[in-house]
Image (tube, helix red, strand yellow):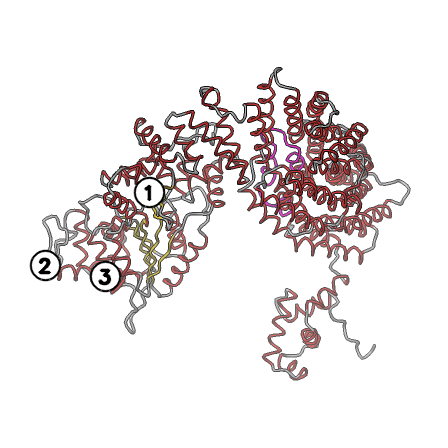
Amino acid sequence: MAQTFGTPLIGRAGELTRLTDVLARARTGTPRSVLVSGDAGVGKTRLLTEAAAHAARTEMTVLTGHCVDLGDVGLPYLPFTEILGTLASDDRFTSAFAAHPAVDRLLGARTGTPRTGTGTDTGTGTDPGGTPGTDPGTRLRLFEGVAALLAAVAEITPLLLVLEDLHWADQSSRDLLRFLLSRGLLQPAAPGAPAHRLAVFASYRADDLHRRHPLRPLLAELVRLPSVDRLELRPMADAEVARLVRALRAEVLSDTTVRRIVERAEGNAFYAEELLAALPGDVDPSAPAMPSGLADVLLIRIEQLSDTAQQVLRTAAVAGRRVEHGLLHDAVQLPQDTLESALREAVGRQLLVPGEDGTYSFRHALTREAVYADLLPGERVRLHRTFAGLLTGRARSAERAHHSRESHDLADALTASLEAADHAQLLGAPAEELRHLEAVLELWSAVDPGARPRTAGPVTLTLRASAAAARAGDAHRAVALTRAALARAGSDADSELAARVRYTLAGHLMRVDSTKAAYTYSSEALAMIPAEPASHTWVWAAATHVMAARYMGHDEDAHRVARQALRTAEELRLPDAQADLIISLVGLDGGNRRTPRGRERLRRARDLAREAGNVSVEMRALFNLAIGCYESGTLDECLTWLSEGLERADRSGLLSSPYALELRYLQSLILYTLGRWDECARAAASDAERLPPAGGFAVGPALYVALARGEDGTVERARALLDGPFDWMASLVAGIVLTDAAALRGDPEGAVAALRESLAGLSDVTGSERPDIGVRLAALALSPVADTAVRLRSAGDASGALRWAATATELVELARTTAAKGEDGTRQGPEGLAWLARAEAEWSRACPPADGTAEERSVAAWERTVSAFGYGDPYELARSRRRFAEALLTAGRREEAADQARAARDAADRLGAVPLREEVDALIRRGRLTGPASAADRVAALTARESDVLRLLARGRTNRQIGEELFISGKTASVHVSNILAKLGAAGRTEAVAIAYREGLIEPEPTASA
């Protein structure tokens, strides 16, 4: 088994452990066999290779025999002749072969001539080529000889036999394997005889075992043996396939590409590798072609079917992955008994899987793809036309649309696509609704005007598609579709439709942070529709304009329009518009959503939106309720609103909509902030498979966890968020990670550059000069800047220290001005003020006053920072405690420094923040903070009884004497002594007593002279 792999084994840790456990038992004389099953390509060979490599590392001899598909003409005993040939070439086993000459016949079968001419077995059951014949006596002597030989080899060296692809094994090999496992190698050794140090691993393809496969009876017999185990390799989990795909490619693959390969591979490692290898140079995830090599592998199994079964399979492939029996019967037009016979054949070959609901599904989607791709063009069109006709009148418009389009009936495809979009909208499936609407728009110009639906025109349909795109989480697609609607409307559109297109475009533009353009279009929309007489269109144009004006900082204009629009909405009884305007007015009242009164107004808005059935506005209200609680530091209440919002989104099919994504981000951020990091990471791993491409920011806080824990690849994952069109939230998350990563590696230039790049991007898009995140970024960048200034000052480089001090002053001014008046003109909440306190404390390190109060001021600054982060962020609190301990140590306040350092280390340990823990440990060692200040911790680590035992140890008492004084047995005293040595990290009793004196755990006893 010399095969090697360039990637680590992924997703099979449990299975490998089972095999290595069997190997460990075999080495000690407990022989066992494992039958490893799984579909072709699922990873059987890779698993056995890893197990064989483990066996070789543990000084077992590994012998491998391969079964080969030679059709009806097979070579008898082929895997065993391969194994024996390897043994025969090893000088260690010469005497064993000499003692069992019966096996020479197998070696003769392997080479075509007998291995020696002096074999003692003169039976006549051999064909002219030396192959063992069918004489029972000859076969039995051969089988017993092979068993005895392998047992003799196992006395010399622990042995692993690996038999691959048993589904291709010939009858003779199956018989020999049955003998070895049931009567030979795996049976207990006779009394006094050496144990058999041997394991047998055999693999076979489960998907090749049709109903009458000759291996089936043997497997049924073997699995009943107590020494034979069965190990089924199931398809890999999607996350494991994704890891494999990324490990196989040196260049970074987009999430879309990986997701597409994972979907098509369906847990099969070989399929995933083939699909990845077939990607074009530009790694286009939409490449539809199946790799030719993979198609050939799949079609070989199809060609083994009868002609009728192949016809049924081809018809089923046109229907899709799954087809009902009745529909297939009508399409294939075969007599019922003929159809059932063909289906039984396909099911027996494990190409189709029957369902309980009278359906048949392809066992693997790629099998269906291969069959479909092999159809002739005319055959494909004919079958699609058949299915389209059969589905007419049934409530399956999406399928009908597909078949009509593939059969070139575009008019019916358009009608069915529109029906499918209506059905998807009813079910709350915006992504599917968008797909069907885009099909309608694509077909519109190709269909005769008389055959088009009269219920809606292209402009209205395009607007509807843009709304579906927004609900599906594709904001950039929503913008593109609305721009297309604007172009289609042209100058002939009536003013109401023109206004509707413009305010819809404005709303979508705000979602992609194009606030200037959004304000322009919302202003145009408002100007096109008069406020009087009151109209639904004017109210929503006004509501959109209020949001755009607020983003642009035109608060007076926003207030005026909002109040007027709210009155009109109340007059027209538009509760969802009222709700939307109330939310905007709460936002316009600086910091109001942080107050009980503001949240009461937001609750009313939620109720109004719910009354109107407008889930999007309802979720906007829930988001503002949650973010208001977060900004005011009431995190438990925030989680309540988040849960309600996400549950509402889930019920409505809007988990990928804009506010749902922001709610998911905020929930992840709360878990991070509360120190529930494992939950945060698990939620991110779960969400990553379901998020739309533009929703990667929603799991951003998991990147903060990964960075704090020192996980590899975090920076690359953060940079990947910046790929594609600009996204404000993604840029914010990436900015935090990249700035902090530079700070953690002590790179002040990199930290400052990351801060400036992030703020420039966020400011350019929103028009805000001071994004709120600037306070946090400034504090993060100040850390390495201050470190550098301190280091240069200590080295006597005054000019260098002054340069970095100037940078520190620039950064702290940024933090101060942003905290005083951020992007919405209000003062920061508890989190922002905590980051400001940290920025001030870092600045005090970089720019110490010259009046001799530097140490005192630094201590005070870090004390304020620790207090500020006490609102509920254990990680930043721990980082601040570490700096506080540093400042206290410099000021000579050692016991307080030790307290802060221990608290920081405990938090880092609890969170798994390895880099921080290492920094704190270094500070503790450097400052020698393990003296009396940590004695309490040591004493607490010992039980009261252990403390008594320790004191007697210091007096030189033996275990028996300790037991007598404490009224316990000497054995119990010995256990206590062992526990003490382990807790103090001592190698012996003398060292334990020395550590106890040094750490203050025991006091020296007074001498007589004292």
Residue 326, numbered label: 1
Asked whether residue 986 is in view, the answer is: yes
Residue 546, numbered label: none
> Left or right: 231 with respect to 860?
left
Q: CA distance from mark 2 to mark 1?
A: 61 Å
Occupied quadrant, residue 717? top right
Q: Which three-letter amino acid code belongs to the residue tagged 1?
A: Gly
Give percent across and percent down for residue 224.
30, 63
Give percent across and percent down for residue 637.
72, 51
**Disc number lying in front (2 or 1):** 1
Asked if the stretch drawn in magenta spans residue 726, the answer is yes
Give percent across and percent down for residue 413.
43, 28
Residue on which disc 2 sits = 123
Q: Nearer the viewer, residue 978 or 713?
A: 713
**Disc number lying in front (3 or 2):** 3
Q: Which residues are magenta?
A: 706-734
Asked whether residue 801 is in view, the answer is: no
Q: Earlier in the sequence, mark 3 or mark 2?
A: 2
Residue on which disc 3 sits = 179
Is disc 3 in contact with disc 1, using a CB cutoff of under 8 Å?
no
Q: Nearer the viewer, residue 171 or 726?
A: 726
